[in-house]
Amino acid sequence: MSSEDTQNEEFSIHWINDLVEEVLERDVDEYRISTGKSTSGSIHIGFVRELIIADVIKRKLLEKGKNARTLLVIDDFDPVRSFPASVSLPLEEWLGKPYSDVPDEFGCCESFGAHAAKELIDTFPAFGVNPEVLWQSKIYELPEMMKAVRTSLKHTETIRQILIEYVARDFNEAQKSEYIESMKTWYPGSVICPSCGRIQAGAKGAIVPNRITNYDPETDMVSFSCPSCGFSDESPLSDLRVKLSWRVDWPAKWYVLNVTCEPAGKDHSVKGGSFDTGLEISKRVFGWVGPVKVPFEWVGIGGRDMATSEGIVFLPKDWLSIAPPELFRYLMLKTGLTRAYDIRPERIPDMIDEYDRFERIYYGLEDAPEDQKEIAQLLYPLCLPGEVPQEYIPKLPFKFAVITSQMEDILGVQTILERCETVLKKQYGLETISSASMDLVPTRLSRARNWANEYGSDRDKVEVPDEVPKEIKDTLTDQDRVFLRSFVDILKKSPLDDEELQSKVFETARNTGLKDKRAFIVLYRILISRKSGPRLGGFLNLLGNEWVIRRIMSVL
């Protein structure tokens, strides 16, 4: 299947309007679209897909005159199970304690959890999302949440039956029997030990929660015995810090926050999974239908699943350093929710070319089939972090920016900007370039340079030495020098465009009896000490005739 066929297939599987209609069926005064993320480490860009889905639902609801807002619940009350390798904090000291209680190793935020969240929150304006940020640790201080905790504890037997029904459905008989036996004394909440501050003992694979062992709804007394330090007690619930088990915590938060709709990754969205369990708890414990489920596939990086706790991450700020945020929104929105998306950073220039064409289709500046024009009208406004400009703003071609950005040290910022303005005029057939267009150039250049340094191939990376190395000068033959002198004469005449200059290399080589391949090798080695490089005509014009003449004369 060709890339165009794949693109058309992706565009044809569109989901936005159907999803918004499903949400509208709830017919509520205020639509609340919620998202949530644990703070076990730096939050990868895959989670931004969830934020964008929620943001798009909100935007479409607002377009229809509805009240709508997005929420982001930061699950900083979750216990530490592990730290990514990059974290310097001693795991044994903080294992089992809530992330909200763990200090920020960098000292700039109030907790480890807050620091991990802030890295993400700082990128919200760039990506065009603005959810109301709620902290799980603070939610548990609300009277409404404590009421939900009590409701859950009072309905422990119902929750036990729901979990047996959903969790054990695929167990074999022995596993099911063992699970049912373990549930006889199970309660849907754990206590943060007043003595050691832990909510569980053990690390991944051997976790023992500090689970409530008894709850008396008449007296509101809770019993527990900490598996970490051995402290046990019976105390009023109001005197303790308690957290519901995660399969119960989720529907409790839905209920307290009155969530209308929530996107959820495939791990939670499978039939009979944690989302379905939460919906059943919503009905049978909290007495309401629960939110609309919006399942979506994961975003990978280079063929691997990302995992926050394991440190396999590509951060939102990493994306912003090499590519525009509207490109990421575009990639997430054009791809069906049930399709995974794998980020291949080495393909960024091609993807930006695709998005630039998509943008021009929206503004009617490029021809396309009718269905693509319709998709552009729907998607383009949703791709932008902000308002849609009334007129198209010309963008510097990214592949040109890749090479140009690496020339700043030898040509200077002002010369680079002048070269970019010239290219924009040629590219779009304009007499003048607007300030709005030129204002975008420095960011485009910065991203292009970062991309080349991090992900570019050897061909994409261009380094111009201060002077031509002696060993290269020594390889020049008399015939090479004849070619170079003739080419200097060409450069001293009127400026030529890229293609004309490219042709002149061939013409001069033939006129001086030098093979074409040798002529190109000679010029590349003088310019960048390599046998090949960027397309030569454009590269020579980028460097400028005066600079190239000085460079060639330095070897003659």
Image: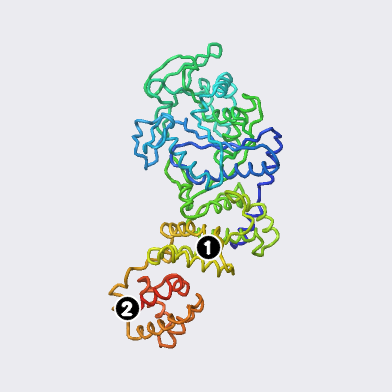
Residue 53 on image: x %, y %: 60, 44
- Front residue of this view, candidates 295 and 149: 149
Residues 373 and 404: in front is 404
Image quadrant occupied by the C terminus: bottom left
Q: How many marks?
A: 2
Q: Amino acid at mark 2?
A: Val
The residue that disc 2 covers is 555
Question: Do labels 1 and 2 touch, CB within 8 Å?
Answer: no
- Estimate how packed mark 2 is, as few (under 14), some (14 to 19) or many (20 or more) residues with alpha carbons within 10 Å: some
Neighbours of disc 1 within 10 Å: few (<14), some (14-19), many (20+):
many
Residue occupying image coordinates x 66% and y 47%: 15
Q: Quadrant of the N terminus?
A: bottom right
Element marked by disc 1: loop
State the residue at coordinates (45%, 14%): 234
Q: Quadrant of residue 248?
A: top right
Image mark for residue 396: 1
Of residues 402 and 437, which is closer to you in this image? Answer: 437
Secondary structure of residue under mark 2: loop
Would you identify the image quadrant in which residue 5 lies? bottom right
Task: Tell me residue 256's x, y (percent).
Answer: 59, 27
220 is higher (above) or lower (below) than 293: above
Tell me if 339 is positioned left or right of 123 in this view.
Answer: right
Circle nearer the N terminus (1, 2) = 1
Q: Could you tell me which residue is drawn at 66 percent across and 65 percent down?
A: 367
- Residue 472: image x %, image y %? 31, 75
Colouring convention used in this rendered image of the protein: rainbow
Residue positioned 42% across, 42% down in the render: 310
Q: How far apart in space, not on screen, are marks 1 and 2 (Cα)? A: 34 Å
